[in-house]
Amino acid sequence: MLRDRSLRRALRLGDRDARVVRLLADGRGCGFAALVAALGDPDEVRTRLSALARLYVLAGERATTRLSLVQEAAEFAATLAAAAAAPEAAAGTVPVHFPPGRDPPRHRCVATGACCSASFLGPMSDNDRIRVSGLRLGARARVSDGADALESVEFQGQELWGMRRIGGDCVALGDDNLCDLHAEHGYDIKPIPCRQFPLRFHRTPWGLHVSLLLACEGYDRARGEADAWSTREQEVRAFLAEGAHVPASALPFEWSAGVPASVAETRGLLDALLQGFDTDIAAPADPLTPETAEYTADPRALLATVVRSFEAATLARAAALSEGEEVAQVAAAGLATAGLADALEGDAPWFDVTGLAAHKARLAARATALADRDEPADVTRLGRFATGLDALIDNAQAAPRGAFRLSELARRHLLDVVHNDLPAQIALGQLDAGLANLARRLRFVEALACALSAADGASEVTARHTTLALKVAYRSEPDITALSASWVRRADAAT
Ligand code: SF4
């Protein structure tokens, strides 16, 4: 066990790595030749030194940079504590950032219950919990006493409260997909997470990042004029002042394992990655009717460009923090995004079909178990997820470009996977893994939307297909992440 006081952590190392550290620490093995003499294989020594460097165990520029970020982490923690102690004051001053390159959402509730069937319907503020627990619910609801309409989960030592689910849906959701709290007591009585939907907040060191939960089928459905971002900003500040629960990004930032960067550097990278978003997308001819807007950007090609820029920036930064030639440097193949850009631009299948088929078999077993437990909402979602996997396996719907026409609004939705979610992933402090996730999400949504269109006997993918596919994808995040084992890397295939 290695106790690291500077970074306040304890690392459990394997025997061989621990031996390298001991040799380095006692001075007898500090030369490369001495390490090779002790371990026997120069390649093994290089690889072990590289792994230790990426854990910031070796003295050098990389570890020094990582240590300097401790101060930034402390400052961010202090900001978070101040916001929690005085939410109203913090709500008035925090800079608010909306998705770049995107017009405000034209949201209209279409009563699909999408916001009322997530795996956790919270977290609520203390006031939400007190208010809801004192209510009488009406005939739509499946409980009559507000105190019975709540449930809690344990998260990182905290007890978080949300609306209770039965069969995968909120107990206040009626058969007509309308909310009983809203119908009986009005909009303002609902907990903050319900009113906030489809906006989602993350707190970053440069302010509050707002994104859209693309699982909502009602976004961009309203025909009237959308509220300007400035109006949405007032709404966001009101939620913050009311005590909205806001997850914070991880700190300090790493662009990839062992590639640390300061807040300013990460913010600069974000700006560079997003540069050109406005020019890549032809502006809608009439911003009030997105159905007729001419979005011409190709979502896959756009994400591929972002991935290439990210890889180049990360490798350059890793080289600048190099410990010397005796420590193997981060190679492109070591990044979670390796091969992604090629796969995004090509028509070849991304996934290993055998892996997908095995995943589908596991889904079927889970669906049977859920059906036995009477959880129909999740069974339906899993069924649609399996349809998306079938489309990827067949590759018929997923690969050939031009086989399906994409309606303009459907294209807007696919672009949102990049525009809206990329800053959100960065706000969460995930860069390479986040980009890989976006790529899988985009390709899955594309395949499922085409499959849904084919099932309708149509040759055009419409906004109805993409919104449904997005809903399935966002409710199936762990399943999409699990597909990473089936990822086909061009780099691997070439060797
Ligand atoms: S309280 Fe209403 S809006 Fe909130 S999750 Fe339940 S049904 Fe949906």
Image: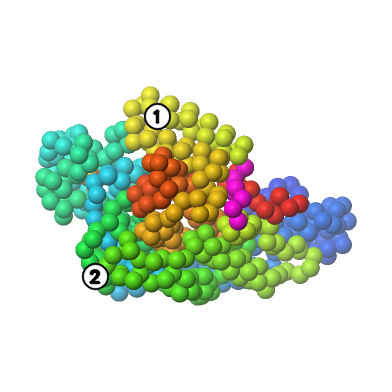
Specify the quarter for ligand 1. Answer: top left
Q: Which residues are magenta?
A: 346-352
Q: Position of residue 208 (x, y in %)?
A: 36, 67
Name the residue beneath numbered marker 2.
Answer: 231
* Residue 307 drawn at (x, y percent): 57, 63
User: How many residues crowd mark 1 within 10 Å: few (<14), some (14–19), many (20+)?
Assistant: some
Of residues 328 and 348, which is closer to you in this image?
348
Q: Position of residue 107 (x, y in %)?
A: 26, 58
Whether residue 64 is situated above or below residue 220 in the rendered picture: below
Tell whether circle 2 marks a residue whose Cβ is less than 8 angstroms from ligand 1.
Answer: no
Q: How many marks?
A: 2
Q: Is mark 1 within 8 Å of ligand 1?
A: no
Q: Is residue 376 above or below residue 90?
A: above
| Magenta-drawn stretch, dominant element (helix, strand or loop) | loop
Residue sitting nearer the eye, 98 or 16: 98
- Badge number at residue 327: none
Q: What residue lies at 57% left-to-right and 34% top-to-bottom?
A: 358
Mark 1: which amino acid? Answer: Leu
Q: Secondary structure at mark 1?
A: helix
**Left or right position of 165 against 26:** left
